[in-house]
């Protein structure tokens, strides 16, 4: 059965210490993570602001990686790059068929259809009929067999150009790219392990130049919606936040078929500390335009939680490797 698909080349073992990169926003983030006995911890990190001079930012980022490699010489120079934002999509689909169908065959067809749907959506969003989308990962979350065969399949995608830019950054920093993984999916996986019972929530990831909203039901990431939005502290913060909330409300409207939204909202990302944001999110009348039964509970997460959640990739790959070794 296909459980995990990540473009990690031919190496079977995932290193205990590795680099996790979040390169999609205004701030370039690099973490050295340690994976040991089913848990992941951060050994060190660096953050570089892109600024107006791209080459200067790349040079500074390379120097930051060199410092981390000096501080943690046992860390493999391999990097997992977290993907999020408007140039990416992630969603979970349920595929149903007769029980006579083969799971791998069913999954293959579902992945092809998901890629086609993601490419159409990204082309529509950017107004580019020639835009090419690439599958980042595909993971079977659950299989149910009764009268029908049901496969719960998570898939994530990004534009080819976006992935090329991330790969170039990693290469110029002196790292070897292990592969890409969805930041929202890994964060949801981490939060689900900490939650008592099933996780039902909305997750707002506020980067310096983008906002991403993830919809979670039954501890599964159902879909992501994103938009670009530069957080600047000049001007009128109250008016700025009102406009941002309108954009968030529009992104919620893009989720199809939701009868009732979850009653919990997690805030994460560097811009979640923007002055007054927590207050306006807490007081916003969410049920005015959207199906909330009650005013949602607002939970603020540590800004570093999102890139740190990439450690979930290592745990899943190691678990998959251990299972193959036990066969």
Image (cartoon, rainbow, N blue to C red):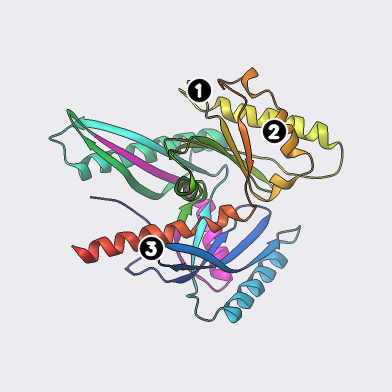
Farthest residue, direction front: 196
Disc 3 target residue:
8
Q: Residue at x 53, y 69 (%)?
A: 171
Q: x%, y% of residue 182?
A: 48, 50
Farthest residue, direction left: 100
Which of the two discs, 1 and 3, labels the residue nearer the N terminus? 3
Disc 1 target residue:
260
Q: Which labelled disc corresponds to residue 64?
A: none
**Cα gap from disc 1 to disc 3, whole angstroms:** 38 Å
Task: Tell me how many marks there are.
Answer: 3
**Cα gap from disc 3 to disc 2, whole angstroms:** 39 Å
Q: Residue at x 58, y 71 (%)?
A: 173
Disc 2 target residue:
281
Residue stretch in magenta: 150-179
Which of the two discs, 3 and 2, labels the residue nearer the N terminus? 3
The secondary structure type at the circle numbered 3 is loop
Quadrant for the C terminus, please.
bottom left
Closest to the observer, 298 or 289: 298
């Amino acid at each position: 059965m296909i459980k995990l698909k990540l473009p990690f080349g031919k190496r079977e073992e995932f290193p205990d210490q590795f680099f996790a990169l979040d390169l999609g926003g205004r701030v370039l983030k690099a973490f050295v993570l340690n994976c040991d006995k089913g848990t992941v911890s951060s050994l060190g990190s660096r953050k570089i602001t892109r600024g107006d001079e791209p080459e200067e930012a790349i040079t500074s980022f390379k120097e930051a990686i060199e410092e981390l490699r000096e501080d943690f010489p046992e860390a493999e120079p391999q990097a997992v790059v977290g993907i999020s934002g408007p140039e990416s999509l992630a969603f979970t689909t349920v595929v149903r068929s007769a029980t006579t169908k083969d799971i791998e065959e069913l999954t293959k067809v579902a992945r092809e259809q998901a890629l086609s749907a993601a490419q159409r959506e990204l082309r529509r969003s950017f107004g580019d009929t020639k835009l090419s989308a690439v599958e980042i990962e595909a993971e079977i979350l659950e299989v149910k067999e009764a009268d029908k065969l049901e496969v719960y399949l998570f898939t994530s995608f990004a534009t080819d150009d976006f992935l090329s830019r991330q790969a170039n950054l990693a290469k110029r920093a002196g790292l070897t790219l292990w592969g890409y993984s969805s930041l929202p999916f890994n964060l949801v996986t981490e939060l689900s392990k900490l939650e008592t019972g099933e996780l039902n929530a909305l997750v707002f990831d506020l980067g310096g130049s983008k906002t991403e909203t993830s919809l979670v039901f039954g501890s599964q990431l159902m879909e992501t919606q994103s938009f670009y939005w530069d957080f600047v502290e000049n001007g009128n913060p109250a008016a700025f936040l009102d406009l941002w909330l309108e954009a968030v409300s529009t992104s919620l409207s893009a989720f199809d078929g939701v009868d009732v939204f979850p009653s919990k909202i997690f805030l994460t990302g560097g811009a979640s500390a923007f002055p007054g944001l927590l207050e306006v999110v807490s007081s916003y009348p969410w049920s005015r335009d959207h199906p909330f039964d009650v005013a949602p509970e607002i939970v603020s997460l540590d800004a570093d939680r999102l890139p740190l959640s990439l450690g979930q990739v290592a745990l899943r790959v190691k678990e998959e490797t251990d299972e193959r070794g036990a066969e």
